[in-house]
Image (cartoon, helix red, strand yellow):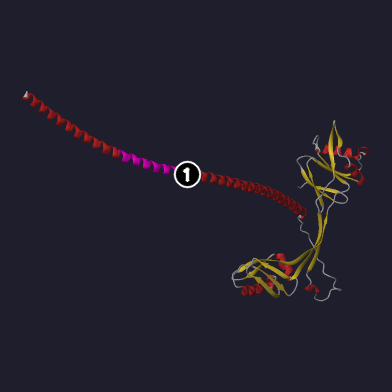
């Protein structure tokens, strides 16, 4: 029994040792779990603090975002208002620009119309005429009434009268009729449309009053010097004073047609000059030549001509419309030109058609054009245009 008891005691001791170990282990584990708990609690506390901090930051960010949204909305509203204002200004400027463009277009049209009118007026008052060469004989004054020295001092004077004849441009499909009496032309002009019998059909023509361009008449008073001679095309080969001396020497030689020189004028820039002789007559003979030999460094041919002055006087402008001549328009080319002119003449000669005696008539077919010149008693036509 002692063995059994001793054995049981031994077992009890061993069991107590095991329980102590387990208790220690349990305490150790408890300590670990406490440490872990404390650590976890610290982490939890830190996380909660971080969460509170983040919540505060989030709240601040939310407030800042709301403020930014409000500022953005306010800025957007201001931008939209500015944009509407700018668009209104752009529309106003666009309308103003369009008005300016329209005004510019109207001004350009008015300017072009004025230019066209100006060209027409200039064309009306321009004189286009080729005056043929005419032999003119100048007669000296009567020797009994002429004082001594007058022939030397007085220039050759001439007065020329230029008169432009009234004209009208006759287009194809038109006719001009001149009646012997004015009342017949007045009667025809009262008719809006005349029906002319032409073989087996009739032809409608429209009588119209003639509108002519203004004609002019003026006088040209011309004074030609007897002593002065114009010299041109003089080469620039020496100084001005030396050139004057050479010209005087050259034009003083009677063997070349010259004479005694009173004075010489010379312009180096233009290469022209003026030679004045003591006696008249030398200038006339040299002018007829047109050229003269001058001794410079070499012998040079220069051009010579008269020196003259002219004036336009008694300039008169005439305008109006002929009383006995009318224009027939819108004539269709139904038959030959001469036959159609005969039909027109027959029709307008009859008193039953309000016509009368015809002095002259001219019809041209399309596409011809001619210029008709009018005078007091008759009418002439020129096919040169």
* SS at mark 1 in the image: helix
Residue 59 is inside the magenta segment: yes
Could you say which quadrant of the image residue 301 lies in? bottom right
Could you say which quadrant of the image residue 55 lies in? top left
Residue placed under numbered mark 1 in the picture: 63
Q: Is residue 53 left or right of residue 219?
A: left
Is there any visible trace of residue 163 in the rendered image? Answer: no
Which residues, given as a range, are shown in magenta? 40-62
Which of the pair 166/133 is nearer the observer? 166
Q: Is residue 168 left or right of residue 104?
A: right
Residue in the image at 11% along x and 27% along y: 11
Residue in the image at 63% along x and 68% along y: 269
Residue in the image at 68% along x and 73% along y: 264
Q: Main secondary structure of the magenta part?
A: helix
**Which residue of the protein is positioned furthest toward the right in this rendering?**
351
Where is residue 360 shown, x and y percent of the image?
Answer: 87, 44
Where is residue 340 shown, x and y percent of the image?
Answer: 83, 37
Where is residue 124 shown, x and y percent of the image?
Answer: 77, 53
Residue 98 higher or lower than 260, as above or below: above
Residue in the image at 92% along x and 45% along y: 183
Which of the pair 127/338 is nearer the observer? 127
Residue 160 higher or lower than 362, as above or below: below
């Amino acid at each position: 029994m002692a063995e059994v008891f001793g054995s049981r005691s031994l077992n009890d001791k061993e069991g107590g040792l095991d329980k102590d170990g387990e208790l220690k282990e349990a305490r150790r584990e408890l300590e670990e779990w406490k440490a872990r708990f404390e650590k976890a609690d610290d982490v939890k506390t830190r996380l909660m603090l971080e969460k509170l901090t983040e919540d505060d930051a989030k709240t601040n960010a939310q407030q800042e975002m709301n403020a930014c949204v409000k500022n953005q909305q306010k800025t957007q509203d201001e931008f939209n208002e500015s944009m509407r204002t700018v668009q209104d200004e752009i529309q106003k400027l666009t309308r103003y620009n369009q008005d300016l463009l329209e005004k510019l277009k109207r001004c350009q049209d008015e300017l072009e119309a004025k230019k066209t009118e100006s060209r027409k007026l200039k064309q009306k008052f321009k004189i286009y005429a080729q005056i043929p060469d005419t032999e003119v004989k100048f007669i000296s004054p009567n020797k009994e009434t002429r004082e001594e020295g007058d022939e030397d001092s007085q220039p050759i004077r001439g007065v020329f009268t230029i008169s432009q004849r009234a004209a009208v441009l006759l287009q194809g499909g038109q006719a001009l009729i001149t009646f012997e009496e004015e009342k017949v032309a007045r009667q025809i002009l009262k008719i809006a449309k005349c029906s002319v019998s032409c073989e087996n059909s009739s032809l409608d023509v429209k009588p119209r009053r003639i509108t002519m361009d203004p004609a002019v008449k003026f006088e040209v008073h011309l004074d030609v010097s007897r002593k002065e001679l114009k010299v041109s095309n003089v080469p620039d080969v020496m100084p001005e004073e030396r050139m004057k001396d050479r010209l005087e020497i050259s034009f003083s030689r009677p063997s070349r047609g010259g004479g005694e020189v009173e004075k010489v004028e010379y312009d180096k820039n233009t290469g022209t000059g003026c030679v004045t002789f003591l006696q008249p007559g030398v200038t006339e003979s040299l002018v007829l030549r047109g050229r003269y030999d001058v001794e410079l460094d070499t012998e040079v041919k220069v051009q010579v001509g008269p020196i003259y002055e002219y004036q336009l006087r008694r300039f008169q402008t005439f305008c109006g419309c002929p009383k006995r001549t009318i224009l027939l328009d819108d004539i269709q080319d139904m038959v030959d030109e001469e036959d159609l002119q005969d039909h027109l003449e027959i029709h307008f000669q009859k008193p039953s058609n309000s016509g009368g005696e015809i002095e002259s008539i001219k019809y041209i077919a399309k596409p011809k054009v001619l210029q008709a010149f009018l005078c007091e008693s008759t009418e002439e036509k020129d096919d040169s245009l």
